[in-house]
Image (cartoon, helix red, strand yellow):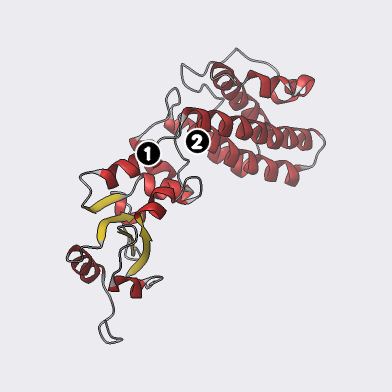
Amino acid sequence: MTAQQPLTYDALVELATTDPAVVGLVLKGSRAHDGMITEHSDHDLYVVLADDATTGLTRFAGHRTAELDLVIVSLTEFRAAGMPGLERYALARARVVLDRLDGDIARILADKARLGADEAFHHAGGLLDAYANSLYRSVKNHRDGQDLAARLDAADSMRFLLELLFALDRRPRPYNKYLQWELARHPLPGWDTEVLLGAVDRVSATGDASLQRHLFALVEAAAREAGHGEVLDAWGEDLDLMRPHRGRPVTATAGPVLPA
C-alpha cells in the first residue's frame, strides 16, 4: 500500500485470506467485545502463519496506525502468546476471523481463557498474600491516621483482589476497561456483580476501612474453601486487624453482604 492508500483492515484481511501461508486471523480488543466499539477503536489483528512459512505479508510486521494494529506471528508463537502474560485476557476474548486449522485456532484461544488447575491454585495463593498485605497496610494506616497512605494501599488491594477472584475461577483477569463488560456477561460464581463492583469502587475511592474488613471476610471464606487457608494462617494475629470488628458473619456462597 502507498502513502496515498494506507493499509486498511479490510484490505489486509483480503490479502491474508488469499495467502496459503496464513492459517489464522484473530481480532482482539474493543472490536472483539460487543458494545465496546467507539469512534477511536482500531482493529487489533493477529496474523498467524504456518510454522516456517514464507510470505510477503511479513513486510507489514509492526504495522500500526489509527485504523490497524498488526501482530504477525508463527503458529508456535501464537500458542505461547500470553501464556503467561498481559496478552492472555485479550486473546481469551478475541474473535476468530479466519481458521484454516479445522478449529485449532479457536481451541488455542479457549485454552488461553481457562487457567490450568495447578496454575490457578499457585497464582491465587500469591495474589491472596498480596491482597492481604495491601489490606493490612491500609487498615493499619487508617488506624494510625495516615489517610492518604490508607487510601493508596486500599486502591492497591483492589487490584490484587480482582485478579485473585478471577484466578479462583481459573480465568485471566480482564483489563480495567473490560471489567464491567466481562462481569456482566460472565459473573464470578458466588459474587453479586453489582455489589462487588460497588465495593471495589468505594474502597478504591475512599479507602473505607469498615468496608474493606467486610469484603475481606467474604474473601477469606472463599479462599479457605479453595484450599488457601495456609496462606491466611501465616498472617497469625494480624488477621484480627483485617477482619470485621463486629456484625453478623458473612459467607461467600450467598453473595456479598456489605454495609451500605
In the image, residue 51 lies at what x, y percent? 34, 57
- Quadrant of the image containing the N terminus: bottom left
> 148 or 5, which lies in front?
5
- Quadrant of the image containing the C terminus: top right
The three-letter amino acid code for the residue at tag 1 is: Asp
Foreground label between 2 and 1: 1
**For the point 32% across and 49% down, which residue is it?**
33
- Up the image or down, 238 lies above or below 30; here it is above
Query: Under tag 1, what secondary structure?
Result: helix
In the image, residue 31 lies at what x, y percent? 30, 56
> 52 or 94, which lies in front?
52
**For the point 41% across and 42% down, which residue is it?**
180
Q: Is residue 244 visible?
A: no
Please tell me the numbered disc located at residue 4: none
Query: Under tag 2, what secondary structure?
Result: helix
Label whose residue precedes the other's in the sequence (2 or 1)? 1
The three-letter amino acid code for the residue at tag 2 is: Gly
> 226 or 60, which lies in front?
60
> 143 or 30, which lies in front?
30
- Up the image or down, 183 lies above or below 248; here it is below
**For the point 46% across and 21% down, which residue is it?**
255
Disc 1 crowd rating (10 Å Cα; few below 14, some 14-19, many 20+) is some
In the image, residue 54 lies at what x, y percent? 30, 68
Mark 2–mark 1 Cα distance, whole angstroms, equals 31 Å
Residue under label 2, please give it: 198
Q: Is residue 7 left or right of residue 233?
A: left
Residue under label 1, please give it: 111
